[in-house]
Image (spheres, rainbow, N blue to C red):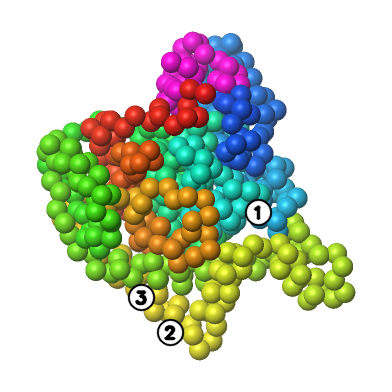
Amino acid sequence: MSILNLSALNLSKKIKNKELSSTEITKAFLAQTHKTNAELNSFLIITEKEALATAAKVDAKVAAGQTLEGLEGVPIAIKDNICIQDLPCTCSSRILEGFKPPYNATVIEKIKALNMPIIGKTNMDEFAMGSSTETSAFGITRNPWNTNCVPGGSSGGSAVAVSSLQAPLSLGSDTGGSIRQPASFCGVVGLKPTYGRVSRYGLIAFASSLDQIGPFSQTVEDSAHLLNVICGHDKKDSTSQNIAAEDFTANLQNPINGLKVGIPEELYNTLSGDIKEEYEKVIKKLSGEGVIFETIKLPSLDYALATYYIIAPAEASSNLSRYDGVRFGHRNKEAKSLIEMMTKSRSEGFGAEVKRRILIGSYVLSSGYYDAYYKKAQQVRTLIKEDFNKAFSTYDVIFSPTTPTPAFKIGEKSSNPLEMYLSDIMTIPVNMAGLPGISIPSSIYNGLPLGIQLVSNVLTESKLLNIANIFEKVINFNVNKNAFINT
Ligand code: GLN
């Protein structure tokens, strides 16, 4: 087995027992990145020098007989909306071209403290608005399973990095599905933690009441290890939860006999016949292991997408008002007045999807419409939370496909925003309720991966990861199938 095929956990074990050095490992992933990035465009920048310097530090520690912690020395890729001090951070937008944050996001502080070599910054939909990574100002990213297909989005680059073995781990952000949907499209594991579990400090804001950073990995176990690294209370994020630390790997092997799983019919019934059949096979397999599946009703989920497209743009329009040509990135230099400079800088700097969100957001927040749209949406959001809450009094976990279809063709939905938005119908309700959700690969349909989404109650990631880990073993999905693996 080559270095690239090893899980992050196995890599860290091999570094610790001196079978492999962090430098050898980092070089192997960098080589795969260099070899495949021209075709996939998953990385915006590759930080080879920095990655190798971190790896050398780890190897020096090993040579000096010092003990290594957790995933120390295991490389990782970072979505380009997470700030790393003195490195470009663009959010795949022209408006941030040239911007180098003067500070690290809290998750980066943690990754740096653990000496995890950072391979580079990954491509994404502009400001994380999109479901296909096609709205990036720096070119589309391709799906390694079929390069005519999108990788999903907005964290498409981070999903592709893990799927094509450019990195054993990566970080993405999830506001309405941006970790789980691309994970599903690319056949990897993607975890959105409970809102507030991971600090958002240094994550460039899209919709602050929904945004959450989380891991991508080949295995559930690896995501549990990475969550251990990045989670925790942070004074710099007022919505970060102040709760006792726990080890998310501790319960991974707990038996799940008699587990009760609810399948919301509002989501399940949107599937087409043959895709439903694929999921029926998965459900049958898991039922054979003593898992009890029941169809349930969560009526408010029918309104989740519409609600999200009021709340998320409202927050985005406010968050993005800071990009005015004065403080960050792109500025129009010909303008004769301040207002003209701001108008031109924003017109030139933002892409069409971002402008659409700013327009929608400004509209729903404007006086006269605020009560009809924004306030109403907040009320529906409460109903969504209540529906989930009720379900968790009977069911351990909620099960659905992660997406209604496998990865779609590049260009297929880019001219129809509503079609594009519908690809997040399964994932968006989870953000609205602030719950943890995970996508794990479940089968291959027409040569493309499909994923299942598992959702549990707030702050029960330990249980969620346990269930996902057992499901992963039962499903036994072979990840080593796309053409970029073994290249
Ligand atoms: N696709 C959704 C949107 O465009 C969600 C994006 C995300 O989770 N960042 O808003």
Taking the spot 46% from the left edge, 12% from the top edge, the residue there is 17
| Magenta part of the chain | 1-28
Taking the spot 55% from the left edge, 69% from the top edge, the residue there is 357
Q: Which residue is mark 1?
A: 137
Q: Which residue is mark 3?
A: 379
User: What is the three-letter code of the residue carrying label 1?
Assistant: Ala
Query: Spatial distance from mark 3 to mark 1, Cα to Cα?
Result: 35 Å
Which is in the foreground here, disc 3 or disc 1?
1
Q: Earlier in the sequence, mark 2 or mark 3?
A: 2
Crowd class of label 3 (few under 14; some 14 to 19; many from 20; radius 10 Å): few
The answer to whether the beta carbon of the residue marked 1 is less than 8 Å from any atom of ligand 1 is no
Taking the spot 29% from the left edge, 34% from the top edge, the residue there is 472
Q: Which residue is mark 2?
A: 372
Q: Position of residue 369 (x, y in %)?
A: 49, 85
Query: Spatial distance from mark 2 to mark 3, Cα to Cα?
Result: 11 Å
Who is closer to the viewer here, 286 or 51? 286
Q: Earlier in the sequence, mark 3 or mark 1?
A: 1
Q: Is residue 173 above or below residue 378?
A: above
